[in-house]
Image (cartoon, rainbow, N blue to C red):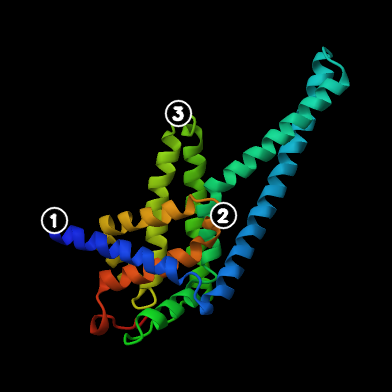
């Protein structure tokens, strides 16, 4: 890619991110933003409570076993150890929530992609042909697939987190690819059949990987990352417009 073209693409990528950030709080998206944040918090809370109960039970059971097996310390000491381990597990879950946010937001995003896309298309591209909404089950299926992929990558990278931050780098690069791929395809499938959207994504793989880094950076920001599904979808609507071309080049999908 020529230097000038690369610079223009980079500028458009930045412009798309700025537009998406500015449009997060549009009146027509406020309700969607609140719903997305609420659902994300609910999911994180449920996962956190379940994991905390599991780890607390394991810690208590382990302490009881050690107490009966060794008998080298009073019951109070083992009970204290179990309590400390439970607290550490809770803190670990809170920290882990940051790394699990891509999976959470991928699932949450599947419920709101069309509401967001329609609002952005109507606001920023009123002269273009509107996209066609995905079926609920198609959007949910895509979101679940990417959520599971994100979770799998998180589990694979977790052992490397303590090795000079290698796991963090792996997670960031993997999230850049996965989130960029997911939200671009969801935006593209409003205008193209599934196979065509995937082919378009593959044809612009490098550019979309770089665009995905913007989403991966956003999802790594605590608290703000609760708005990731709204930001990412709005952002990829703009990116898709750049990749596919505007106006007559955007033909509604036929399948």
Earlier residue among tags 2 and 1: 1
Mark 1 closeness class: few <14, some 14–19, many ≥20 residues within 10 Å: few
Q: Is residue 246 above or below residue 221?
A: below
Earlier residue among tags 1 and 3: 1
* Residue 74 visible in the snapshot: yes
Residue at image point 77% right, 29% down: 82
Name the outermost residue toward the right: 75
Q: Rounded to the nearest whole Å, what is the CA distance between mark 2 and mark 1?
A: 37 Å
Residue at image point 80% right, 24% down: 65
Q: Circle 2 sits in a helix, a strand or a loop, which is it?
A: loop
Question: Which one is closest to the eye, mark 1 or mark 3?
Answer: 1
Give whichever of 150, 236 is nearer the camera. 236
Locate the N terminus by quadrant: bottom left
Provide residue 222's location: percent of width, then percent of height. 54, 50
Q: Rounded to the nearest whole Å, what is the CA distance between mark 1 and mark 3?
A: 36 Å
Residue at mark 3: 163
Q: Circle 1 sits in a helix, a strand or a loop, which is it?
A: helix
For residue 42, which numbered disc appears in the image?
A: none
Are circles 1 and 3 on residues that touch, CB within 8 Å? no
Earlier residue among tags 2 and 3: 3
Provide residue 45's location: percent of width, then percent of height. 68, 54
Question: Would residue 166 be found to the left or right of residue 102 on screen?
Answer: left
Q: Rounded to the nearest whole Å, what is the CA distance between mark 2 and mark 3?
A: 26 Å
For residue 3, which numbered disc appears in the image?
A: 1
Residue at mark 2: 223
Question: Which one is closest to the eye, mark 2 or mark 3?
Answer: 2
Are circles 2 and 1 on residues that touch, CB within 8 Å? no
Q: Is residue 161 above or below residue 251?
A: above
Mark 3 closeness class: few <14, some 14–19, many ≥20 residues within 10 Å: few
Quadrant for residue 201, please give it.
Answer: bottom left
Question: Would residue 66 be found to the left or right of residue 199 on screen?
Answer: right
Provide residue 221's location: percent of width, then percent of height. 50, 51
């Amino acid at each position: 890619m020529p230097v000038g073209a690369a610079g223009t693409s980079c500028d458009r990528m930045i412009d798309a991110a700025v537009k998406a950030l500015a449009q997060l709080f549009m009146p027509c998206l406020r309700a969607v933003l609140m719903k997305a944040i609420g659902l994300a918090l609910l999911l994180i809370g449920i996962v956190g409570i379940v994991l905390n109960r599991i780890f607390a039970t394991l810690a208590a059971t382990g302490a009881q076993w050690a107490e009966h097996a060794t008998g080298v310390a009073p019951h109070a000491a083992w009970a204290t150890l179990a309590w400390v381990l439970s607290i550490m597990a809770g803190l670990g879950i809170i920290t882990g929530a940051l790394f699990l946010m891509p999976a959470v937001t991928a699932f949450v995003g599947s419920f709101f992609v069309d509401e967001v896309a329609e609002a952005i298309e109507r606001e920023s591209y009123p002269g273009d042909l509107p996209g066609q909404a995905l079926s609920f089950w198609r959007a949910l299926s895509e979101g679940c697939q990417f959520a599971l992929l994100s979770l799998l990558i998180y589990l694979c990278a977790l052992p490397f987190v303590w090795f000079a931050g290698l796991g963090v780098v792996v997670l960031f690069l993997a999230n850049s690819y996965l989130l960029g791929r997911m939200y671009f395809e969801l935006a593209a499938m409003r205008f193209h059949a599934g196979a065509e959207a995937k082919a378009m994504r593959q044809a612009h793989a490098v550019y979309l990987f770089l665009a995905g880094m913007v989403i991966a950076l956003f999802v790594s920001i605590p608290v703000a990352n609760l708005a990731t599904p709204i930001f990412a979808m709005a952002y990829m609507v703009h990116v898709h417009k750049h990749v596919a071309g505007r106006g007559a080049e955007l033909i509604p999908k036929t399948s």
